[in-house]
Image (spheres, grey):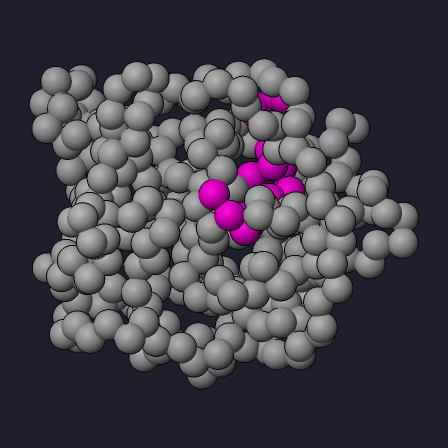
Amino acid sequence: MMKKTLIALLTTVALSTSACAAEDAAQTSAPQDVAPVVATATAAVTSGFNAPDEAWRDLDPENTLYIDLDYGRVVLELYPEIAPLHVAQIKALARQGFYDHITFHRVIEGFMNQTGDPTGTGAGDSELPDIQGEFTFRRPATMPVTLVGARSQNGKEIGVGFYKALPVATQPGSQAMLTKDGKVAAFGLHCKGVTSMARTNDPNSANSQFFLMRGIAEHLDAQYSIWGNTVLGHEYLTKIKVGSKGDDPNFIPDEMNKVQLAADVPEGERVKVQVLKTDSPAFKNYLKTQKKADGTYPDICDIRVPTRMK
C-alpha cells in the first residue's frame, strides 16, 4: 500500500475541493531525546483572561477526544459540522480501541506528528472504508466567524478568523445572499494544534492515519481534511519524539496510550475545560489584548483561544 504522507504543495492552494498532485518534499529532522514525564491528565491551566461566566462554553462530550500520552492528556474538539465523514470515522475507531498504543510513526520538527497506522510503517490503515475528502466546507450564517485579519489567496485577500476555537479562512458572510445555498466557502487552517487527516495522492484515500500540527503549514490548507483542534495540552505536542524508522531503524517512537471520547469517560473523570466563545464580546475584548504595537493583529496561528478549567 502507498504510504500516506503529507504532500508539500509548490503553489498557493485554491478555495476549492480539488487537490493538486505534487511531490512529497517534506524532510524529517534528526530524532531528539525527550525526558519521559508520566502524567495521566493534563495540568489544570487557565488562560489568565478574565471574562464573565456566560462568555465561556462547555465542550460537547460527544465531540471531545482525549489522547493520553506519556506526557499528559491532549484534549481535542471535533467539528462534525465541518468534516462529518472524518469525525464519524475517528469516533468509530476510537470507540473500537483502534488507536490505543498506536505510535507516532512520522514526526517532523516544526511541522507535525503523524499517527494512526497500526503497522507503524506509514502504509497501514483500519479495516473501515476510505473517506471522501472534506477539504473545504460551506458556512451558513449559523456558523459565525470572528475575523482577525486576511490572507492572500490566488492574488485576492480572504478573511481569516475563528469558528469556535478553530482558525478558518472564509469568504465574507455578505456573499451568502449571492449563492444558491445561502452559504459561503470556508476551510480550516493548519495552525499548531489542528488535527488533519493523512492521505495518499488520491484525495479520497484518508482512512485512519492523522496528524497533529506542531507548527504552521499553509500549503496544506484546503488540501487535507481538518476535523479537530487542540483546546488543552498544546505543550505536549512538541514533546513527542521527532523521527521515523524510515530514517533511523533504531528509533523508538512515542505512542498514544489511550484514545477515547469524553462521552465514554465517567463524568467524574472528564477534564472540566471551558473555551471562550469566539462570537462573544468577551472574545473581542481578548483580541484587543493581542494587538501588536502598530495596531494590527499577529498571524491568526499565533492567537490561541482562551480556555479555563471549570
Which residue occupies the foreground of this view, 259 or 223? Answer: 223
Residue at 32 percent across and 40 percent down: it is 168
Direction from residue 134 to residue 3 in the image, left or right: right
x and y percentages locating residue 156 in the rendered image? 26, 19
x and y percentages locating residue 67 in the rendered image? 57, 63
**Can the viewer see residue 85 in this picture?**
no
Residue at 60 percent across and 36 percent down: it is 198
**Can the viewer see residue 216 in this picture?**
yes
Q: Quadrant of residue 28?
A: top right
Overall secondary structure of the magenta section: loop
Position of the N terminus, as image quadrant, is top right
Does residue 88 sit above or below 77 in this rendering? above
Which residue occupies the foreground of this view, 13 or 28? Answer: 28
Which residue occupies the foreground of this view, 53 or 7? Answer: 7
Direction from residue 226 to residue 124 in the image, left or right: right
x and y percentages locating residue 191 in the rendered image? 44, 46
Residue at 51 percent across and 48 percent down: it is 215
Does residue 107 sit above or below 56 in this rendering? above
x and y percentages locating residue 80 in the rendered image? 39, 45
Residue at 14 percent across and 26 percent down: it is 176
Which residue occupies the foreground of this view, 141 or 74? Answer: 74
Kindly give the residue lying farthest to the bottom in the view shown: 268
Direction from residue 40 to residue 280 in the image, left or right: left
Is residue 202 highlighted in magenta? yes
Kindly give the residue lying farthest to the front in the view shown: 293
Q: Which residues are magenta?
A: 197-216
